[in-house]
Image (cartoon, rainbow, N blue to C red):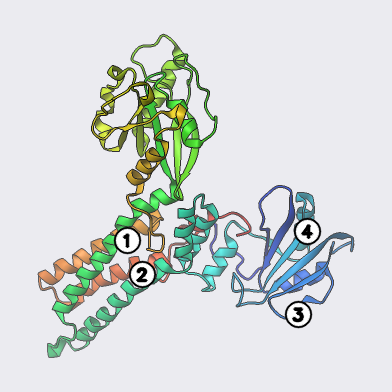
Amino acid sequence: MNVLAGIEETIVAIATPPGVGAIGVIRLSGKDAIAIADKIFKGKKLAAQPSHTLHFGRIVAPDTGEVIDEVVISLFRGPKSYTGEDVIEISGHGSPYILQIILEACTKAGARMALPGEFTQRAFLNGKLDLAQAEAVADLIAANSKAAQKAALNQLRGGFSGDLKQLRDQLINFAALIELELDFSDEDVEFADRKQFQELIAQLKTQTRRLLESFQLGNVIKNGISVAIIGKPNAGKSTLLNALLNEERAIVSDIAGTTRDTIEETLNIKGVLFRLIDTAGIREHTSDQIESIGIARSKQNAEKAHIILHVVDATTPEQAEMDWLAPFATKTIEVWNKIDRVPHLRLPEGAMGIAAKQNLGIDALKERMYTQAVGTAIDTEDTIVTNARHFDALNKMMESLEAIEAGMAANLSGDLLTIDIRRALHYLGEITGQVEVDRDILGTIFGKFCIGK
């Protein structure tokens, strides 16, 4: 994607998802958006209307004058619009055919089809959003849980950018003092208090470390937690899956080996998405080739999962041992099922007792899963890093801060210290787009957006 391709052109795209709906929206943005809309709109003359107004009328084909649809047009004049340019949004009936015809009418009248993410790209290029906020738009669209929505919204509102600005301003102020020293190098003066600078670097490292540490939680919020349900045949894995979901999703049978392949479902616990994987029962020897493949997949899923629920049949505790699980002890929750059938059962330390068929202990298990995944309740008002690009830039900034610290300990001169200070500033600015970001990186970022956004 060429980041500056056709920036002077007016772009158009369908902004609503594919499929039939009550309404569909087509969006135009650019210096000729209003003029193009006037060519195909029969109603009030849009060029004469004020910004942020709605207008009812008809869309007609620009070449034949044939009526296509009755619509409502929303008019936004730049710079007070999403993109910072003149924007027209045409709300018509949600027929895919009608929307396509309106789209063709717009292109015949002079608009160009928008590239993926080009509207948000223009918002960034026109200073309506910084780069971190622009990426939050994509995260908000893709949010599939309350926690993901809250984290993305906080970033879109500038929470993360505000934290970075604070870090950047502190570094810039001190860099300016060191630069001033260089101007008076012949007079051997020191404008920047080195002790104060050491304290500032220590503070910046603490703040940066906090942001870096939040990435693990951010990754959980954004992508969800994978949970592999494993155990011997007939331990009650599928019954547990059904109980967690509160629906009959998996086939439950007394016949061993009913689950031959993995079954995947999602579960929302306190706003965090858990991806549950019900696996084939694991036994050491089977003559069934298909079951063998299922068992191999079960082990693979367990190795990749963030959490393993090891389901044990409490009526046959001797089958609890699974030696291959030992390396994954820290992410494994041992779940003893059918405890209603075993009076006075003493559970191993750390194990949880449930009766999946009777829904006994399921809420406590959900609480344990949540705690193991994210710890205490998530405060989405805090800044949480959810983007791998931001995490990488913060890591590089931390390296620069450590280099500055080492340089001061070695009594390096100001001109050498400024090299690492500028590096740290560069990586901070790279996150928000305050420094020039490689066009390929921008293309990758905005290329992930849907067309129309």
Are the residues flagged by discs 3 and 2 in contact, CB closer than 8 Å?
no
The kind of secondary structure element at disc 3 is: loop
Percent position of residue 385, x then y: 38, 58
Checking the image for residue 316, the label placed there is none
The kind of secondary structure element at disc 1 is: helix
Residue at figure coordinates x 54%, y 30% from the top left: 249
Report the quarter where the N terminus lies. Answer: bottom right
Q: What residue is disc 2 on?
A: 163
Residue at figure coordinates x 35%, y 12% from the top left: 285
Q: What residue is disc 3 on?
A: 49
Percent position of residue 200, x then y: 21, 74
Are the residues flagged by discs 1 and 3 in contact, CB closer than 8 Å?
no
Sequence-wise first label, 4 or 2: 4
Percent position of residue 67, x then y: 88, 61
Front-most of 253 and 191?
A: 253
Dot in front, 4 or 2:
2
Are the residues flagged by discs 4 and 1 in contact, CB closer than 8 Å?
no
Q: CA distance from mark 3 to mark 2?
A: 40 Å
Q: CA distance from mark 4 to mark 2?
A: 43 Å
Q: Identity of the amino acid at label 2?
A: Asp
Q: Identity of the amino acid at label 3?
A: Gln
Res 257 → quadrant: top left
Q: CA distance from mark 1 to mark 3?
A: 47 Å
The kind of secondary structure element at disc 2 is: helix
Give the residue furthest to the left: 410
Residue at figure coordinates x 28%, y 64% from the top left: 208
Res 109 → quadrant: bottom right
Q: Looking at the picture, does residue 283 appear above or below residue 126?
A: above
Are the residues flagged by discs 1 and 2 in contact, CB closer than 8 Å?
yes
Q: Identity of the amino acid at label 1?
A: Leu
Q: Identity of the amino acid at label 4?
A: Ile
Mark 1: few/some/many CA within 10 Å (<14, 14-19, 20+) = many
